Amino acid sequence: MSSVGVGHIALVGAGPGDPDLLTVRAARLIAEADVVVHDALVGAGVLALVRPDAELIDVGKRPGAGVAQEETNAILVRLANEGKRIVRLKGGDPFVFGRGGEEAVVLAAAGFACEIVPGITSAVAAPAAAGIPITYRGLAASFTVVTGHRQYGELPVNWAALAQAGGTIVILMGVAERGVIASALMVGGLGGDTPVAAIRLATTNRQVISRCRLDGLSDLDLESPATLVIGAVAALNVTEVAAAGAYAVDPC
Amino acid sequence: MSSVGVGHIALVGAGPGDPDLLTVRAARLIAEADVVVHDALVGAGVLALVRPDAELIDVGKRPGAGVAQEETNAILVRLANEGKRIVRLKGGDPFVFGRGGEEAVVLAAAGFACEIVPGITSAVAAPAAAGIPITYRGLAASFTVVTGHRQYGELPVNWAALAQAGGTIVILMGVAERGVIASALMVGGLGGDTPVAAIRLATTNRQVISRCRLDGLSDLDLESPATLVIGAVAALNVTEVAAAGAYAVDPC
């Protein structure tokens, strides 16, 4: 692993919350950075790894407030022009939503090639933290990760096709629209008894797991943000010893 | 981060290849393990972190050879009963294919709750290493990860529904069936000109990136294993300075 000199910019995934789930590369870059530009979803445990003398810039988008994307882009280009060692720290993985691709393009257009450091996305880590394998032989041979965030006023997802695809559905940023999403999936063919799990603050010591049926999702008491897992695997907890007898294990 | 005592078993994701893309927790557990039980896909750089005096057991499945799943399950239960510090090391993430869920169930049924340590899946890291964001505003608001591996003699995926879903499609273990998969997706409605990228040995110093159209995928010269990325984003390389002018950046 090489250390980095000045004039280095990395788009770094901060993982799901637990700082132990940073990659080795991410932890190194964060500790070496002159400036860390971070989102709202990056946890306190991760930010604690930033050098005390480094600059910390919060560009988190928050309901009705926060920093606009153009402003974030401009900040990144300015810092890159200053020759700083920059970590642009994004919750989860930099290319799983969160507009990391756009920021990389803006930087490339300004003449700066960034390093991309992938992170553990909550789409995978949150179910795992609840004992839910997002794929499981005989139950789910695929998984789809979608955003429940509106773009241009609409949910940019073909829910009927997803309902037919047969795999696990993982929804990020979908708490506010969970009723609309559940209805669309049921119209598309998913049964009302399809298992659902919701995981809040996954991998932190404040993690909360809720389970329900798809037809009960709109009534589930749930604060944003949470990861929603929809499909047969959402009923499992494969790390729970007491429950293990209930699962058929398919040999080969 | 706590160290672990004896009698600890962890299902650990080894990430895509580069040992710097292990999580901090995974690197710690590997270095402390008494025994590491690993798959064929775990790279040499990761295995180099195992203690010289630790036991290393290769349970890799290989075409026409390797260790059957029941035997792997039996090995894990035996080691757990011996009270060892065990790392079950799987390429990528332990719950993204690879039958980690089944191994956790077998262990739970034997009375052992495992720790699950997520890893960076190649489904996300391989495209990123090629400069491909698997989601991108206006191009892909979802991604689906599927296996191209036959189960019970069939490809267990509804390709027509996936073709209609509109997001990025990432296929792991799909090299052998790439012609069948491409045909099924085109029958389902994807255009023959849909961009495709194939990434071999992602994040290692032997990484190879190939790009083609969906109707050329069956003729692409490609060795297994590789990660296949299908969809509009597969044409991008957002970290390439020379190409940046070609991408529209959508403000907000």
Image (cartoon, coloured by chain):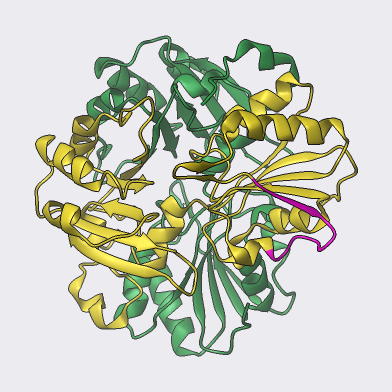
Chain colours: A green, B yellow
Residue B47 lies, in percent from the top left, at 67, 61
Instruction: Please report the residue visible at 66 percent of the width from the left and 65 percent of the height from the top.
Output: A24
- Residue B250 or residue A205, whichever sits in front: A205
Instruction: Please report the residue visible at 33 percent of the width from the left and 79 percent of the height from the top.
Output: A108
**Residue A204 visible from this viewpoint:** no
* Total marks in image: 0
State yes or no: residue B56 in magenta.
yes
**Residue A137 visible from this viewpoint:** yes
Residue A222 lies, in percent from the top left, at 55, 26
The rendered magenta stretch, by its main secondary structure, is classed as loop
In the image, taking residue A248 as reference, residue B84 lies left or right, namely right
- Against B116, residue B70 (above or below) is above
In which quadrant of the rendered view does residue B216 lie? bottom left
In the image, taking residue A225 as reference, residue A107 lies left or right, namely left
- Against A8, residue A226 (above or below) is above
In which quadrant of the rendered view does residue B212 lie? bottom left
Give the magenta part as a residue range. B48-58
Instruction: Please report the residue visible at 32 percent of the width from the left and 68 percent of the height from the top.
Output: B209
In the image, taking residue A176 as reference, residue B148 lies left or right, namely left
- Against A82, residue B70 (above or below) is above
